[in-house]
């Protein structure tokens, strides 16, 4: 019988935004109940709120500590399937690395507006480097954890928006094929054909909420009520929420889904309510 575990990894440091932690906690609460799936919470510190830059990225030592704890727990549990609630995109590193060693032929479908192959010279937050780490590039301090690196042929981007110039250079260096998503609806046949052509028996799905059009799904980065400026070259998701839900649901029926990450869920309204309750004295009595 397959063993499935659920990981709640409220890592906010790799995206430098504490709301990621609240997102992970809410995802864990609203997920369908299954008493056969062990739930494990990875502890992540709340402070310091203002992270220091280390080797070009924010909060690196705290992030490395969280990563180490995650690897240790997965290796102790030795699951066959892993559900991960983030937190930011970096939470997928340890589960994918482990499952890539657990199975001979793992395909990774990356539902994301961004390619996540950056390095500290390109960007200052670790969550943009997770696939780079898994390909033995990215941030060398985090890539050191990887025991079973991916190959470029194991990655399919779904919903990718126009990469930056530096990202395009890195994608070319990594020899990763990709298509920029132009429509609001995902093409399931492209993904299914990729799976068949590469003969993947096992699939990992990584879902970053920023793949979606902020008008059809609110809890995304670009709906931050305190956000005052959006760069003109920002990669904003355009996919309709229903298309994302339908595509993932169909893939879960058509494939052996061995891993699923939901990342970068940013519940802005819940954070505002949490702030209200923190400032209301009756909760302290």
Image (cartoon, rainbow, N blue to C red):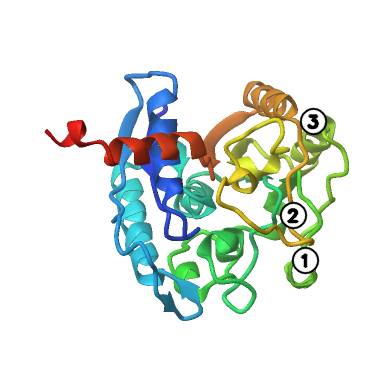
Q: Residues within 10 Å of mark 1 (few under 14, many from 20)?
A: some
- Dot 2 or dot 3: first in sequence order is 3
Q: Which x, y percent locates residue 2?
A: 42, 27
**Where does label 2 land, which residue?**
235
- Dot 3 or dot 1: first in sequence order is 1
Q: Which mark is residue 128?
A: none
- Residue 81 visible in image: no
Nearer to the camera, 214 or 60: 214
Whole-Å distance between the Cαs marked 2 and 3? 22 Å
Circles 1 and 2 in contact, beta carbons < 8 Å: yes
**Where does label 1 land, which residue?**
164
Q: Quadrant of residue 78?
A: top left
Residue, x 20% and y 33% (percent of image)?
Answer: 283
- Would you say 206 lies left or right of 59 here? right
**Where does label 3 land, which residue?**
188
Q: Which x, y percent locates residue 114?
A: 69, 54
Residue, x 38% and y 34% (percent of image)?
Answer: 5
């Amino acid at each position: 019988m397959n063993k499935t575990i659920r990981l709640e990894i409220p890592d906010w440091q790799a995206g430098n935004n504490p709301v990621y932690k609240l997102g992970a906690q809410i995802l864990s609460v609203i997920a369908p109940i299954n008493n056969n799936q062990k739930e494990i919470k990875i502890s992540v510190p709340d402070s310091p709120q203002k992270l220091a830059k280390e080797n070009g990225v924010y909060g690196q030592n705290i992030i490395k500590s969280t990563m180490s704890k995650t690897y240790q727990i997965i290796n102790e549990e030795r699951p066959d399937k892993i559900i991960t609630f983030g937190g930011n995109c970096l939470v997928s590193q340890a589960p994918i690395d482990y499952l890539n060693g657990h199975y001979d032929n793992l395909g990774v479908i990356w539902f994301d507006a961004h390619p996540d192959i950056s390095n500290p010279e390109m960007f200052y937050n670790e969550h943009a480097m997770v696939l780079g780490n898994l390909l033995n590039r990215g941030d060398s301090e985090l890539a050191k954890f990887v025991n079973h690196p991916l190959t470029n042929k194991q990655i399919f981007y779904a919903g990718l928006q126009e990469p930056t110039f530096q990202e395009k250079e890195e994608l070319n260096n990594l020899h990763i094929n990709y298509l920029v998503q132009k429509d609001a609806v995902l093409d399931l046949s492209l993904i299914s054909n990729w799976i068949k052509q590469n003969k993947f028996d096992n699939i990992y799905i990584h879902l970053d909420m920023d793949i979606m059009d902020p008008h059809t799904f609110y809890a995304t980065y670009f709906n931050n009520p305190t956000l005052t400026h959006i760069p003109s070259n920002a990669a904003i998701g355009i996919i309709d929420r229903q298309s994302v839900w339908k595509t993932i649901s169909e893939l879960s029926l058509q494939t052996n889904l061995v891993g699923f990450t939901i990342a970068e869920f940013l519940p802005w309204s819940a954070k505002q309510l949490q702030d209200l309750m923190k400032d209301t004295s009756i909760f302290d009595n």
